[in-house]
Amino acid sequence: MRFTENELTAALTGAAKAVVAADRKHRKRGADIDEVWDGMDRYQRFTMLDALGSQILPVLVALPDVEVEPGTRPTFTEQQVKDTVTDLVGEEHGRLRRAVLIKSRIALVQTALAHVPPRLDPDAILPTDGL
């Protein structure tokens, strides 16, 4: 699938915020995730994005091409995501560890896909008046 840089950035940032929000210390306080994210220093955000990027980005790039109408998000079936993740995880781990990796990575990718912004209409980006 061909995602734009903005779509990949939004997907990865959304997944990272979801992981930070799942942290028990933030859940117990009832902290606003955007405030927590903004309160993290640049290095903390970088390490979170780097760790998640190595897991999510290869899957997003390997997803099959789908037609995306302007104003909508790309949608993939659960089976498409599962097949892509399974292919990328490979056979190098034990059966139980592999199953956990696949399930957790599927959840991360689905969270990232939920944060992809709607696709913009390429014809509407450039002004047509005055040409």
Image (spheres, helix red, strand yellow):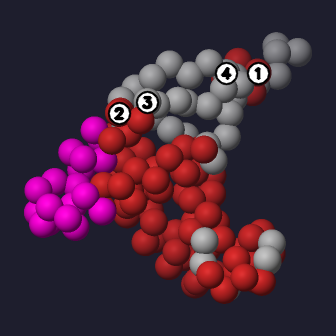
Q: Which mark is residue 70?
A: 4
Rendered image: mark on residue 79: 2
Crowdedness near tag 2: few (<14), some (14–19) or many (≥20) residues, C-alpha within 10 Å: few
Q: Do we see residue 100 in this rendering? A: yes
- Identify the residue at horizontal 36%, vertical 47% (top origin): 59
Q: Is residue 98 magenta?
A: yes
User: Which residue is at the front of the view, 124 or 59?
Assistant: 59
Q: Where is residue 105 drawn, in percent x and y?
A: 38, 56
User: Which of the two discs, 1 and 4, sits closer to the camera?
Assistant: 4
Instruction: Classify mark 2: helix, strand or loop.
Output: helix
Kindly indicate whether the residue at mark 3 contacts the one at mark 4 (C-beta within 8 angstroms).
no
Say if 50 sits above or below 75 in the image.
below
Residue 37: percent from the left, percent from the top? Answer: 71, 74
Q: Specify the amino acid type for callout 1.
A: Ala
Any mark on residue 8, and which? none
Mark 4 surroundings: few (<14), some (14-19) or many (≥20) residues within 10 A: some
User: In whole angstroms, how far apart are the C-alphas of marks 2 and 3?
Assistant: 5 Å
Residue 17, position in %: x, y?
Answer: 64, 66
In the rendered structure, find residue 124 and report the number of the disc placed on it.
1
Q: Answer whether labels 2 and 3 touch (C-beta < 8 Å).
A: yes
Q: Residue at x 46, y 71 (%)?
A: 50
Quick one: SS at disc 1? helix
Q: Amino acid at mark 4?
A: Pro
- Distance (Cα) linking label 4 and label 3: 19 Å
Tag 1 near tag 4, CB within 8 Å? yes
- State the image quarter where residue 54 is shown: bottom left
